[in-house]
Image (spheres, helix red, strand yellow):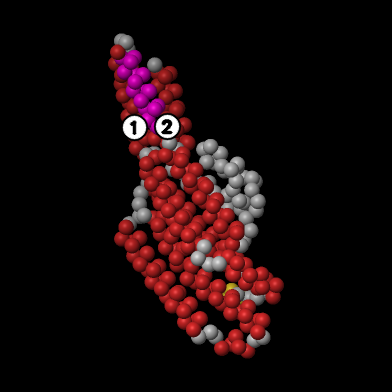
Amino acid sequence: MRRIFLTTCWLSLSACSTFSFSPPHVDLHQKMTGASLKADCTLTQGTGAELPENVAGARALIRNYFDAYECAMRVSANGRQAFEIPAFLALAGTTTAVALGAGPNVAIAGGAGNSIFSAGKNYYDPRQQTAILGDAIDALSCLQSEAIGISPTVIEAVSEQQADRGFRSASTGGGTVQVTVEVQYFDMIYAKLANIHAIATDRLATRGNLNAGSVASEIELLANKVREAEEAKRKAKEDPPTTITALSDEKAQLVQDAQSVQLDLNVLEPKLAKCVVRAKA
């Protein structure tokens, strides 16, 4: 009976490892395919094409996160069974042995074993994990919906012109660097996905929610930022900078298009940030 008990404890530890509160594995460099995730949701590298730093790459990266989190969600939803079956077998096996005349030591060992399973089941409760992953998926859905608010055709066209003409669209303390609006878009999506992943990872580690009051305040602050960005975009379209008129028609159009997309990105950033907050709910 001791051997049975030890074997069951080993099964318990194995389940704890399989259904632990580790964050989902996401490929940040390649498009994930059907072969990218194993049955236990661990990642297999080198199965897809490289992710380009453009609109298509950003959307493929969102899809990578969806696939990883949905896989983890499925495993988590099935996790409770993996904990409860060994616990039931431990208790049932001990009860049967006692009924057949086993001594009091067996009954004590069986009861202790069942207590260990129950404690482990509560500590690694898959329902908590599933809820946290569900919030992350909700945030990803929001981000995906907001990300299509800017026309990819316009972004790609402006970026192509910027690349051909060496257009300088981003400034730093020491001067300017060449960053097309398409790269800015990709980096923005990449950063927000990383934020969602970090929030989910922290919540999985602490098994809890963040303060509801702070989340509400953050949403209100971001809503104000969205309104400010939309107002700045409206004013810029009504009163374009006079410096553009001094340029050639072709160059002026490029600058105007780039500024228009940049204004769209300025509106998009706080909208995406609001989506990130949904992972904290």
Tell me the kind of residue under disc 2: Ala
Mark 2, secondary structure of its residue: helix
Tell me the kind of residue under disc 1: Ser
Look at 40% across and 59% down and name the residue there: 277
Mark 1, secondary structure of its residue: helix
Instruction: Read off the magenta span.
Output: 81-98
Q: Position of residue 280 (x, y in %)?
A: 39, 55
Look at 60% across and 67% down and name the residue there: 153
Q: Is residue 21 left or right of residue 152?
A: left
Q: Quadrant of residue 6?
A: top left
Quadrant in which the N terminus appears: top left
Q: Is residue 278 left or right of residue 24?
A: left
CA gap, disc 1 and disc 2: 12 Å
Is residue 94 in the magenta section?
Answer: yes
Q: Position of residue 116 (x, y in %)?
A: 35, 30
Question: Vertical placement of 15 versus 24: above or below?
Answer: above
Is residue 85 in the magenta section?
Answer: yes
Residue 118 is labelled as: 1
Disc 1 to disc 2: CB gap under 8 Å:
no
Q: Is residue 83 left or right of residue 182?
A: left
Pointer 1 local density, CA inside 10 Å: few below 14, some 14–19, many at least 20:
some
Pointer 2 local density, CA inside 10 Å: few below 14, some 14–19, many at least 20:
some
Q: Is residue 177 left or right of residue 111?
A: right
Which one is in front, 88 or 237? 237
Question: Vertical placement of 209 versus 106: above or below?
Answer: below
Q: Position of residue 32 (x, y in %)?
A: 59, 48
Residue 82 is labelled as: 2
